[in-house]
Amino acid sequence: MIDYAATFTNFTGAFPNIEAVNVSAPGAGDGTEFVAALVNDIWGRAQALLDYAGLTPNGVQEAPDTAQILTALSKGYGIGPGIGVIYWKNGTPAANGDRVILLQGQVIEISSYPLLAAAVYVGDANNGTAPAFYKTSDAGGTTRSTSGTYMKLPDTRAVSLKGVGNQTINGRTKVGPTALGEKQEDQMQGHFHTPLNGNHFLTGLGGKEGNRTVLISEGDWWIGQISTGGLTSDGTNGDPRTGANTRDSSIGTNFGITY
């Protein structure tokens, strides 16, 4: 931006608190000058924002519903409706006056959040099967309808976020969700124990003898034995064990979305 102190004769204060001054009387000529440098500075920043966002002037005068500058800011800096946020503030977004909704599986009325709904809607073709961001005709979110006036949001409480799609890491394919809002559960890595000594598993203290594993099985060294007559499900080839719970390190926060 231009240096106001170097451009204008009549002003007050110093950077960053420079302000314009009014004329002392009509025609006095002691007010802040309205010069081309000031106009070009305003035009320049507006055009820079549009260019940065890949937009060109649409010929419509800026107004609350047609402000292209707002669109440029949203697209250029990824801050518009539909952007995910981690919300650490104390209190709810509504109480704090923030344009954020916490994602807790609720159903919203589209007319109250039109920009968000337009940004995240899954489309008519996916409305019948999408796990979230689909339209419904009722506030309970039970009746899907492409002409519905409500939208279902995903529930991020008590779950970790994972990127959509798959990738290969160290030669193994890591399978992620296939769609936004889809949940993955009970996909723990399972394993089976190898049966030893005929019909039994032996569980005991052991060690290595050369390349061979040695199980100590004398006296009280045995901790127990498990029959091979019915393998316990490993969570991959059968139903997971009731009450089993394995989780990574995590920290509590609120996940929200801008509107």
Image (tube, rainbow, N blue to C red):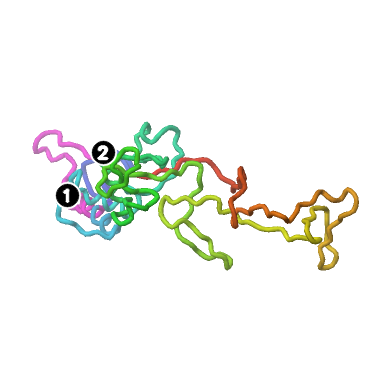
Give the residue pinned by disc 1. Answer: 35
Q: Quadrant of the C terminus?
A: top left
Tag 2, which secondary structure? loop
The amino acid marked with disc number 1 is Val
Segment tinted magenta in the rendering: 20-45
At a point 87% along the width and 55% down the height, the residue shown is 217
Q: Choose between 188 and 196: the one closer to the eye.
A: 196
At a point 38% along the width and 48% down the height, the residue shown is 132
Numbered label tally: 2
Residue 182: x %, y % from top left: 44, 51
Secondary structure predominantly adopted by residues drawn in magenta: loop
Residue at the limit of the structure toward the front, as seen here: 229
**Disc 1 from disc 2: Cα separation:** 17 Å
Tag 1, which secondary structure? loop
Viewer can see residue 155: yes
Which callout, 1 or 2, points to the residue nearer the camera?
Answer: 1
Residue at the limit of the structure toward the right, as seen here: 219
The amino acid marked with disc number 2 is Thr
Residue 24: x %, y % from top left: 15, 33
Disc marking residue 12: 2
Report if residue 38 lies within the magenta region.
Answer: yes
Disc marking residue 207: none
Horizontal placement of 59 versus 132: left or right?
Answer: left
Report if residue 210 lies within the magenta region.
Answer: no
Q: Choose between 71 and 214: the one closer to the eye.
A: 214
